[in-house]
Amino acid sequence: MIEYASAAIFKHEWRGLPRWKDIETDIGKEPNSHDIEDREKRLAQDAEFARRFAKSRQFLEAFNAKVKDTAAISRQVGNIYTGSIYLGLASLMELGRIDPGERLCFGAYGSGCSALVFSGMVQPGAPAVPSMNIWERLEKRRQISLDEYERLHQGEMRESILAPYQEFALLKIDEQGYRHYEYAN
């Protein structure tokens, strides 16, 4: 999903810039939607151009330079929904890929008709934030059984499978559904 979203953003942003001519030289002209009356044909041509764009040298270079590393940890963890945007930030921090003064863009989408996009500026002290050793912690994971997963999911387990250590942990969910967390040392 991150590649498709990035391709859509870059395609929109680059249209009209000098690099756009190079892209169209490499992958062909973008179809002019106004010239195609048949809706299905128009959608098919737009989708085909989008596929070619997402495989273009220019897009892949920009994606690898600007976006790919944000998904480094997510490729190991999987989807954590809205938390994925912050896991992307953690990926960049763990890889030492943020510099003070740099602007970062965060984007997330919902299952309905909603999306969230915001940016943040990397502050001078950011590189001094200690590593959370996420890669090391991921190596210590253990597989759980289907029974354990179901019991966790249904709220039947009273003890955590892995005791929390130096992190925020869910303490309880109250009668109104609010989650309460506590820092565990």
Image (cartoon, helix red, strand yellow):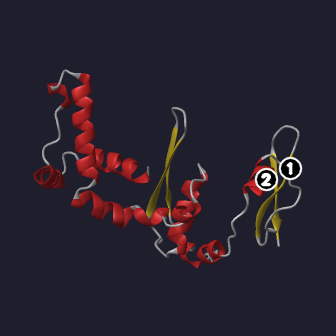
Viewer-proximal residue among 40 and 110: 40
Disc 1 crowd rating (10 Å Cα; few below 14, some 14-19, many 20+) is few
Q: Where 45 sits versus 138, above or below?
A: above
Amino acid type shown at disc 2: Leu
Which percent across, then down, holds residue 104?
Answer: 46, 59
Viewer-proximal residue among 40 and 83: 40
Disc 2 crowd rating (10 Å Cα; few below 14, some 14-19, many 20+) is some
Q: Marks 1 and 2: CB-CB under 8 Å?
A: yes
In this rendering, does residue 123 appear at all?
Answer: no
Q: Where 75 sits versus 18, above or below?
A: below
Numbered mark located on residue 152 in the image: 2
Q: Where 58 sits versus 136, above or below?
A: above
Q: Report how far apart the C-alphas of labels 1 and 2 lie in the structure.
A: 6 Å
Viewer-proximal residue among 79 and 100: 79
Residue 41 falls in which quadrant of the image? Answer: top left
Residue at x 21% of width, y 21% of height: 38
Residue at x 40% of width, y 61% of height: 67
For residue 63, side relative to residue 181 (left or right): left
For residue 89, side relative to residue 171 (left or right): left
Amino acid type shown at disc 1: Glu
Q: Secondary structure at mark 1?
A: loop
Give the labeled residue for mark 1: 156
Which percent across, then down, holds residue 134?
Answer: 62, 73
Which percent across, then down, holds residue 7?
Answer: 33, 50
For residue 89, side relative to residue 5 (left or right): right
Residue at x 89% of width, y 56% of height: 158
In this rendering, does residue 4 appear at all?
Answer: yes
